[in-house]
Amino acid sequence: MSKHTDTAVLQQDQWLKRYYFARALFSMLWVAAAFLVGTRSAVIAAALLVLYPAWDAAANWVDANASGGLQANRTQRINVWASGLTTIAVCLALTAGMNAVLGIFGLWAIASGLLQLGTALRRWKSQGAQWVMVLSGAQSALAGGFFIAQSQMPTTPSIANVAGYAGVGAVYFAISGVWLLVRQMRRRQAAT
């Protein structure tokens, strides 16, 4: 590996580490807000349910731009659109009730999970350390199917249904950040 390539990989590792930790922190805070306040207030729950896919759209946009631009990151470009459209769909579904919202979240979890899996597989070639993001994408797609099934049940779901999903996502992002941190520490030790 050339010095230029090695420097680019290290810079991308630095970016991804910060990005993964930021995603984990946001999701943890979102889950805490969902359980502490969202389960008690329909208005706050609605705002949180709209915020979650909007944040995902913004996060994918920022990451894609920091990783070569939207043109070079097709899966993230599509994910920005999917999450943006989901934000609008959740706004509309809120008028129909939580079953409709959970169905929208299910479709989105499948799409964004598969797109995340695609992004992780693409990054694996240049960055490595993407196995957790591959698992996260696959789990998201599976959870989406579960959400769709739950949305058809007579029981009315709540924000807690989505909060569990977001909590698992936070764990995946945190593990990915830690994995990159450990990898950086090992590189530094090997260089000395």
Image (cartoon, rainbow, N blue to C red):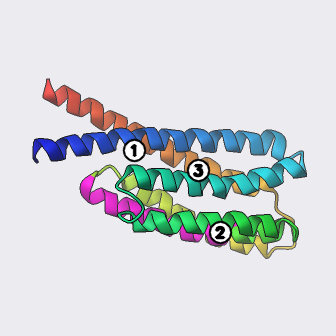
Which of the 4 image quadrants contains residue 145?
A: bottom right
Going by the image, does 103 lie left or right of 57?
right
Q: Nearer the viewer, residue 50 or 20?
A: 50
The reply to whether discs 2 and 3 touch (Cβ–Cβ < 8 Å) is no
Mark 2 secondary-structure assignment: helix
Q: Position of residue 148 (x, y in %)?
A: 70, 73
Q: Position of residue 14 (x, y in %)?
A: 35, 38
- Mark 2 vs mark 3, CA separation in Å: 23 Å
- Frontmost of labels 1 and 3 is 1
In this view of the protein, can residue 146 be seen by the observer?
A: no
Amino acid type of the residue that numbered disc 1 sits on in the rendered structure: Leu
Question: Which residue carries the number 2 mark?
Answer: 85
Residue occupying the point 74% across, 57% down: 50
Q: Position of residue 59 (x, y in %)?
A: 53, 51
Amino acid type of the residue that numbered disc 3 sits on in the rendered structure: Val
- Boundaries of the magenta span: 105-126
Residue 36, compared with residue 110, is above or below; it is above
Callout 2 crowding tier (Cα within 10 Å): few <14, some 14–19, many ≥20: some
Mark 1 secondary-structure assignment: helix
Amino acid type of the residue that numbered disc 2 sits on in the rendered structure: Leu
- Mark 1 vs mark 2, CA separation in Å: 25 Å
Callout 3 crowding tier (Cα within 10 Å): few <14, some 14–19, many ≥20: some
- Mark 1 vs mark 3, CA separation in Å: 19 Å
Question: Which residue carries the number 1 mark?
Answer: 16
Question: Which residue carries the number 3 mark?
Answer: 168
- Mark seen at residue 96: none
Q: Position of residue 67 (x, y in %)?
A: 36, 52
